[in-house]
Structures are given as structure tokens and as C-alpha cells.
């Protein structure tokens, strides 16, 4: 009799252990869909090139604000004869 | 113009200091280095140079058809430089480059004349008035023309001949613009009448708007007969361009400037372009420039304007000469050795009418053996030369100086001196010129000015000075500015180069 009780208890323990293990294995989790066959690998699309910064002229530097005094000096310089020299035209003049 | 010759009263009109310097400066020669200061490069003194022996005639080779076409094109465009194409090329001259031997010779002559005129001007070197000492060096274009033809660089050579200065280039643009205005009929005159000012309503206001719009792109040509704020601002801009009081009120004085015909403005531009050709090809980077026509002084340093001030230049009849020289020293607390002409005409009569006048004004009488006594005004606040005098060598004994009469700078027509140039800010100029001199610090100048002791401060480096006469110039925004030709030198110049005498439409 005692042996029968022991077998029953062992069986219960086995059932409980199996139950606990089954919970850890997450058997109630929904089955994931099988992965679809991979699409053929296409070349990644080239990023749309941004407009080249070099083609756009840089924004003009903001004009330097002259002080009234400097403006007056410049105006007076024009009145006394603007003797600064005009820059040379770029490049060499063509031959005749 | 005979009146502009070197007259007896001209030399020493301001001060015969050179002769009297030992008297008045005595031992005050002043704590300055004894070695001669370095002199900045000055343009060659063409007027004083001995004329070179005439070069052997240079034969000009025949121009290729392409060169002939270039030449004809440039000569036909001579009016861009205020010159007359007919002076260089006859009407009907072929422009296809296919020239006969005679036409080759005509073209070569025209090229040589044009090259001469556009580079150094049309004035006969022997006919410069004495007061016009800014003169070009002689120029024979023949060797350069031969080389340009041989090198195949005729166009480049012709382009290199006119002055390269911004002032000249701006006048060239102005000439094109004012000729366009003339071609469209110029501008209508505005009738004289009462003053027009902000808020007033006048039937002449529309005419004023239309007139201002011709020269000023900011002005709308049409509008009501009421003088509004934008019109006032336009009037102020115009008054500034003419060098008159910019009060925004249009009286008959302003109207007289506005009514100057466009042809007159074109002639002014042409006269001033001619003067630019007398300038040296390059300028020293540090220099003082004076425009006696506008009575303005500018100091350039490193080729940039760094200081400017109003001036008072010689009055008509006592015109300040055009000249180049170099400021070598600043005299602090200068006495005034009165030129005999001024003494006789102005001071002795005052003494007779008001005995004690001379003594009260600091003059002392210096006996001269066998001659008229001289007058000398002591240094100090009442000295006619003020506290500073800037000395430079010249045959007219003119110089730049301070003045106790500061009110003269408030005027807009500032041709009122005996020929010297009075400065609005002499102290600032003195400090700028003496900069770098360890002796003449600001504090040292202050100490000197506490008394009346005369002292001559030699500049560490002589500074070239150019006394010029401009009556037309462009401001930084390209707008043409005009002055009233106070010495009448524009007209005289145009007559001397045949522009007015010939009756040619310019």
C-alpha cells in the first residue's frame, strides 16, 4: 500500500514537473508564419543626388556696413580724385 | 588766360616763410633726426625736366588688314574718351582694312595722334598756364606703336593708353550716360519762383520730379504737385551731388544748378578727363590729395582713403595752383610772415583806418633796410595760420595750414583764401603724418600747443601732396557729382584744347 502511495506521489510530481517545463517552453505562443521566400535581391536604389553645392554660387557676403565717417571719407576721396587703379582684365589680351 | 600767369603778387601770397625761416624759427629746429628723411617716390617733375633731344623719326610699318580694322574701330570710338574721332580719322575712311599707301599713312598718323592725346592729353606742353603745374611727361608713341604692330598686340596697346584710375573710368561711364541723356533731349528747365519745400504745393513740382528723375534712378518721374518726403530726399541727394547746402529746399540757387544744360555737364566731364591724363601713371601709396574745386582734402594710406576733411582753397583771383610736391615738415605754432601784397592791400589800410589794429592782432613791424617794413603776426590762437602749417616745396609759397576762422568750413563754396589751403582738422592730419615719430607723440604735441613757441617737426617720411582741380567726379554709387568750376579752369582748358573754340559738339 505504502508503495502504491509513493508511486502515485511520484507520478504527481512528474506531472507537475512536466507542467512546469511545458510553461517554460511557452507552448501556447501562436505559431509564427513561415517566412516567405526571399525576394530576389535588387540593387539598393541610388540616393537622389542633391544639387551640387559647387554649382551654386555661394551667397554673396553681406555688404559691410560702412560707418558714416567711413562713408564720408570715401565720398571725399571720390571728390579729391579716386586714384586707386582699376584691376587688370583677366587673362592676356588676344593678339591682333 | 593772361590772368593766370605767374604774377608778381602770386609768389609768397600766403607766406614768404622760406626766406624768413631763420628769423622766426631760430634755434627751434627741433629735436629731429638730422639725416634727410626718406622721400616717397614722386612722379617725375615733367615741368622742370630738360626736354630730351628729339628722337630720330620712326618708320611705322604698314598695318595688316586685321590691324587696320582694329585701328579704325578704336579711332572711331575716340569719343568714349572725350576726344573727337574726326581729329584722327577722316570721314569715309574704309573700315575693311584694305588700304592704299596714302590711307596707310593717314591711319598711322591718326593712331600716333590718338595715342598721344588719350595718354597725355591735348594740351600743348608749352601752353600750360603757370598755375597748372600738374603736367604730364612728354610721350612719343611711335616706338610703342611699332612694337605693338610687330608683336601683333595693337588692341592691347591701345587699351593700355588711357588712365587706369577709377576716377577716370567713372568719368568715362558718366560721359556715356550723359550723352545718352542728351540724345534723348536732355532735361527741361524749371522756372524760377518761390521756394519749394516739404508740404508745399507748386505747379513746378511735377517738372522738378521729372528733372530729378533724369539723373537719379531712385526718383519716379511722375507724381502730384505736392512736395512730398521722397521728393525732399531726392532734392537732398541732388544738392549733395552739386556740393550745395543739402537742406531739401528748392530755391532759385538749387534751380540754377538743376537748369545747367546737359551739354554743360558733358563738357565738364570732358575737361576733367583731360586733366586725368596729366596725372602720373602710378601714385605713391601714402599721399595727401586736395581738390581745390570742391575744397576737400583726403589722406590716402596704403592706397586707401583713411582721413578726409573740408578745406578752404584760394578764391577766384587768388587761385590755389595745381601742383605736386612732398610735405616735409609740420610747423607747430607758426607765425605768419605777411606777404607784402596782402599787407599793402588789406592790413595797412586797416591800420590807417583804425590805429592800433596791427598791435591788437599780434602783428609786429619788422624794418627792412631800404625797403618797406614787413609785417609778421605772432604765433598763437590769433595767428592767421592757426596752430599747424604743413610745409612743402613749391614756387608759389603755398601750403596747408590751420586757421582761427573755423566758420569758413560751414560754407559750401569754400574758395576764400589767398591761395593757401586751410584745413578743417589740421591736428588730426599732423598726428597722422607724424605717426611713428617717437618725438612727436600726442602728448608732445599737446605740450607744444600749451604755449606759442614755434617748432618745426620734420616728418619721418616725406608725404607726397597732390593739389588738383576736379569739378566732375563719380561717387561710389556711380552717380555723377559736379561742382561749379569756381576758377573757370574747365572753360579755359576746353578752349586751349580746341573743344570750345572749334564749336564741335562734344
Image (cartoon, rainbow, N blue to C red):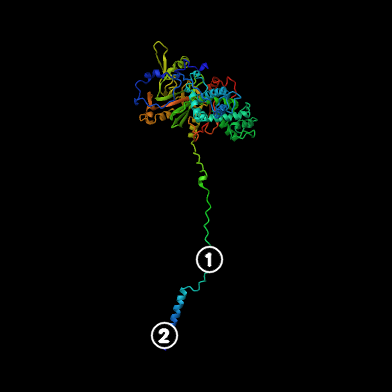
Q: In the figure, is residue B118 to the left or right of B327?
A: right
Q: Is residue B244 visible?
A: no
Among all residues in the image, which is located at the extreme top? Answer: B370
- Of marks 2 and 1, which one's residue comes earlier in the chain? 2
Pair 2/1: label in front: 1
Q: Which mark is residue B215?
A: none
Q: Is residue B74 above or below residue B375?
A: below
Q: Residues within 10 Å of mark 2 (few under 14, many from 20)?
A: few
Depth check, front residue: A29 or B392: A29
Q: Quadrant of residue B20?
A: top left
Chain letter behind tag 2: A
Depth check, front residue: A26 or B143: B143
Q: In the figure, is residue B178 to the left or right of B45?
A: right
Which quarter of the rendering shows the C terminus of chain B? top right
Q: Quadrant of residue B484?
A: top right
Q: Which residue position holds label 2?
A: A6
Distance from disc 2 to disc 1, alpha carbons, whole Å, reads 54 Å
Q: Which residue position holds label 1?
A: A37
Pinpoint residue A85: horizontal percent, then vertical percent. Answer: 48, 31
Among all residues in the image, which is located at the extreme bottom? Answer: A1
Q: Is residue B17 visible?
A: yes
SS class of the residue under badge 1?
A: loop
Q: Residues within 10 Å of mark 1 (few under 14, many from 20)?
A: few
Depth check, front residue: B286 or B486: B286
Pinpoint residue B3: horizontal percent, then vertical percent. Answer: 51, 16
Pinpoint residue B168: horizontal percent, then vertical percent. Answer: 52, 29
Q: Are marks 2 and 1 on the same chain?
A: yes
Q: Is residue B348 above or below residue B415?
A: above
SS class of the residue under badge 2?
A: helix
Residue at screen point 42% across, 89% down: A1
Amino acid at each position: 500500500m505504502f508503495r502504491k502511495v509513493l508511486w502515485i506521489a511520484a507520478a504527481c510530481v512528474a506531472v507537475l514537473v512536466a507542467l512546469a517545463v511545458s510553461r517554460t517552453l511557452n507552448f501556447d505562443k501562436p505559431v509564427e508564419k513561415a517566412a516567405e521566400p526571399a525576394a530576389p535581391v535588387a540593387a539598393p536604389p541610388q540616393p537622389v543626388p542633391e544639387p551640387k553645392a559647387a554649382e551654386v554660387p555661394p551667397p554673396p557676403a553681406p555688404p559691410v556696413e560702412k560707418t558714416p565717417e567711413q562713408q564720408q571719407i570715401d565720398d571725399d576721396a571720390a571728390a579729391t580724385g579716386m586714384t586707386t587703379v582699376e584691376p587688370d582684365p583677366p587673362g592676356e589680351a588676344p593678339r591682333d | 588766360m593772361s590772368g593766370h600767369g605767374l604774377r608778381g603778387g602770386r609768389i609768397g601770397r600766403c607766406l614768404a616763410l622760406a626766406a624768413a625761416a631763420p628769423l622766426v624759427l631760430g634755434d627751434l629746429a627741433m629735436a629731429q633726426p638730422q639725416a634727410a628723411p626718406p622721400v616717397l617716390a614722386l612722379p617725375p617733375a615733367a615741368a622742370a625736366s630738360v626736354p630730351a633731344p628729339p628722337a630720330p623719326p620712326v618708320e611705322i610699318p604698314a598695318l595688316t588688314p586685321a590691324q587696320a580694322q582694329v585701328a579704325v574701330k578704336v579711332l572711331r570710338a575716340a569719343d568714349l574718351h572725350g576726344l573727337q574721332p574726326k581729329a584722327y580719322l577722316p570721314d569715309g575712311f574704309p573700315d575693311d582694312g584694305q588700304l592704299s599707301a596714302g590711307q596707310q599713312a593717314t591711319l598711322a598718323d591718326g593712331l600716333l595722334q590718338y595715342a598721344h592725346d588719350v595718354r597725355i592729353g591735348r594740351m600743348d606742353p608749352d601752353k600750360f598756364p603757370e598755375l597748372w603745374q600738374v603736367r604730364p611727361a612728354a610721350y612719343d608713341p611711335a616706338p610703342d606703336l611699332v612694337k605693338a604692330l610687330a608683336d601683333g598686340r595693337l588692341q592691347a596697346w591701345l587699351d593700355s593708353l588711357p588712365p587706369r584710375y577709377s576716377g577716370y573710368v567713372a568719368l568715362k561711364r558718366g560721359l556715356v550716360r550723359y550723352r545718352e541723356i542728351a540724345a534723348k533731349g536732355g532735361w527741361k528747365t524749371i522756372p524760377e519762383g518761390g521756394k519749394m519745400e516739404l508740404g508745399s504745393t507748386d505747379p513746378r513740382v511735377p517738372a522738378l520730379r521729372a528733372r530729378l528723375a533724369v539723373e537719379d534712378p531712385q526718383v519716379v518721374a511722375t507724381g502730384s504737385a505736392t512736395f512730398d518726403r521722397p521728393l525732399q530726399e531726392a532734392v537732398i541727394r541732388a544738392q549733395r551731388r552739386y556740393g550745395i547746402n543739402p537742406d531739401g529746399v528748392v530755391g532759385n540757387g538749387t534751380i540754377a544748378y538743376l537748369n545747367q544744360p546737359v551739354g554743360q555737364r558733358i563738357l565738364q566731364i570732358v575737361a576733367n578727363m583731360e586733366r586725368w591724363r596729366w596725372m602720373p601713371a602710378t601714385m605713391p601709396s601714402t599721399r595727401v590729395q586736395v581738390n581745390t574745386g570742391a575744397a576737400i582734402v583726403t589722406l590716402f594710406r596704403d592706397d586707401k582713403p583713411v582721413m578726409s576733411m573740408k578745406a578752404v582753397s584760394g578764391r577766384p583771383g587768388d587761385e590755389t595752383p595745381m601742383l605736386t610736391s612732398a610735405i616735409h615738415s609740420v610747423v607747430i605754432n607758426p607765425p605768419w610772415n605777411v606777404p607784402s601784397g596782402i599787407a599793402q592791400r588789406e592790413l595797412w589800410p586797416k591800420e590807417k583806418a583804425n590805429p592800433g589794429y596791427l598791435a591788437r592782432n599780434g602783428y609786429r613791424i619788422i624794418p627792412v633796410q631800404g625797403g618797406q617794413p614787413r609785417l609778421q603776426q605772432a604765433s598763437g590762437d590769433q595767428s592767421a595760420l592757426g596752430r599747424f602749417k604743413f610745409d612743402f616745396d613749391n614756387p608759389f609759397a603755398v601750403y596747408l595750414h590751420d586757421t582761427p576762422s573755423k566758420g569758413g568750413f560751414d560754407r559750401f563754396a569754400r574758395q576764400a583764401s589767398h591761395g593757401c589751403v586751410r584745413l578743417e582738422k589740421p591736428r588730426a592730419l599732423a598726428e597722422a603724418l607724424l605717426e611713428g615719430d617717437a618725438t612727436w607723440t600726442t602728448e608732445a604735441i599737446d605740450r607744444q600747443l600749451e604755449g606759442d613757441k614755434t617748432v618745426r617737426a620734420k616728418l619721418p617720411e616725406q608725404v607726397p601732396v597732390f593739389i588738383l582741380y576736379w569739378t566732375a567726379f563719380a561717387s561710389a554709387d556711380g552717380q555723377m557729382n559736379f561742382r561749379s568750376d569756381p576758377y573757370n579752369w574747365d572753360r579755359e582748358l576746353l578752349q586751349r584744347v580746341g573743344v570750345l573754340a572749334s564749336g564741335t559738339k562734344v
